Amino acid sequence: MPMAPAFARRLNPLLPEIVAAFGTPFHIYDEAGIRETGRRVSEAFSGFDGFREYFAVKALPNPRILQIMRDMGFGFDCSSIAELVLSRQVGGRGDDLMFTSNNTAADEFAAAAADDGSILNLDDMSLVAKVPEMPDLISFRYNPGTRRTGNSIIGNPVEAKYGVTHEQLPDAFRAAMAAGATRFGLHTMLVSNELNHDYMVQTAEMLLDIAHWIGGKLDIRFEFINIGGGVGIPYRPNEQPLNLEVMAAKMAARFADFESTAGYTPKLYMESGRYMTGPHGVLVATA
């Protein structure tokens, strides 16, 4: 894992003392660096009304790290009961939590609904009938299939077993509406560790197009679109970091276009994992 230069400057002078106190091996994380990345994310998207980062708990399910994310005003992307529990232990409640699971069982639905609930993000339209009590706000994970490519880490969408297909999407929202949902979100997760900001912009544009299509078809408005995770960090010296500020500016233009056509603007959500913590943590080991 690459280490941010500022982290190295802070850590190296203290490393002998830390090793002497705790022994090795251990992981150590740089709170200052994590908070700086969080500040950059919040500042880059400050022009988006209601923007929120949902930290991917699976990336680093460490209670202290989650508390830092909570302090910065971020929510939590959870995919298991354990991740819900950890997020709630640091104060996450209700819309602070995005629960995206697959092959969801009854105990998982119960956990998602407990303690003021969570945003339920379903990745299969067959799950609608399995939700014990349909919440007011529901989201679906969209799989564009052949309409988009993925990357070498996460694979191509057409080969993925997760997500509602393009053809299924209208019926999925109809079923949720029939079960009582009145507020709607749209989510996708196509890549991992992506350094090309234009790919992420295209993902936002794709979801806005889908929101416009479904909105017109079913006469609904979308409360949010969630471009998922996938924002990456450079692992090799020749790799350039993703330009977060340019990405945000290009997305803002796409949202302005949507508003001029649809007459409203959904909120933008993201679910970063390694981007938030990767460059700010290191495994220290001695022979």
Image (spheres, helix red, strand yellow):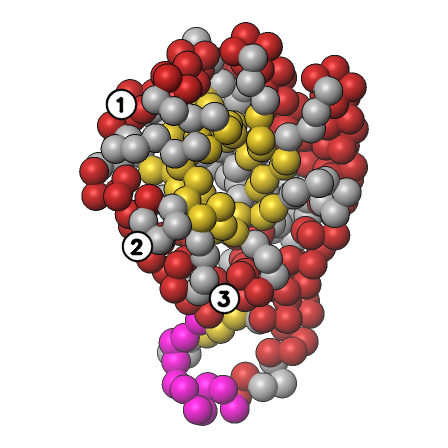
Question: Mark 1 falls on what kind of element?
Answer: helix
Q: Earlier in the sequence, mark 3 or mark 2?
A: 3
Residue 143 sits above or below residue 35 on the image: above
Q: Residue at x 70, y 25 (%)?
A: 264
Q: Is residue 25 magenta?
A: yes
Instruction: Give whichever of 197, 104 is nearer the camera.
Output: 104
Instruction: Give whichever of 135, 99 is nearer the camera.
Output: 135
Instruction: Give whichever of 80, 283 is nearer the camera.
Output: 80
Q: Residue 77 got which mark?
A: none
Label 3 amino acid?
A: Gln
Q: Residue at x 76, y 33 (%)?
A: 252
Residue indicated by mark 3: 67
Residue 90 sits above or below residue 171 on the image: below
Question: Mark 2 falls on what kind of element?
Answer: helix
Residue indicated by mark 2: 82
Residue 211, by quadrant, is top right
Residue 154 sits above or below residue 112 on the image: above
Question: Mark 3 falls on what kind of element?
Answer: helix
* Percent of width and height locating residue 149: 53, 22
Q: Residue at x 55, y 18 (%)?
A: 220
Q: Residue at x 49, y 18 (%)?
A: 144
Q: Residue 129 got which mark?
A: 1
Dot 1 alpha-carbon crowd within 10 angstroms: few under 14, some 14 to 19, many 20 or more = few
Q: Is residue 157 visible?
A: no
Quarter of the picture containing the C terminus is bottom left
* Percent of width and height locating residue 58: 40, 51
Label 2 amino acid?
A: Ala
Report the magenta residues as a range: 17-27
Which numbered mark, 1 or 2, is in the foreground of this view? 1
* Percent of width and height locating residue 268: 63, 37
Locate residue 60 relative to residue 212 in the image: left or right: left
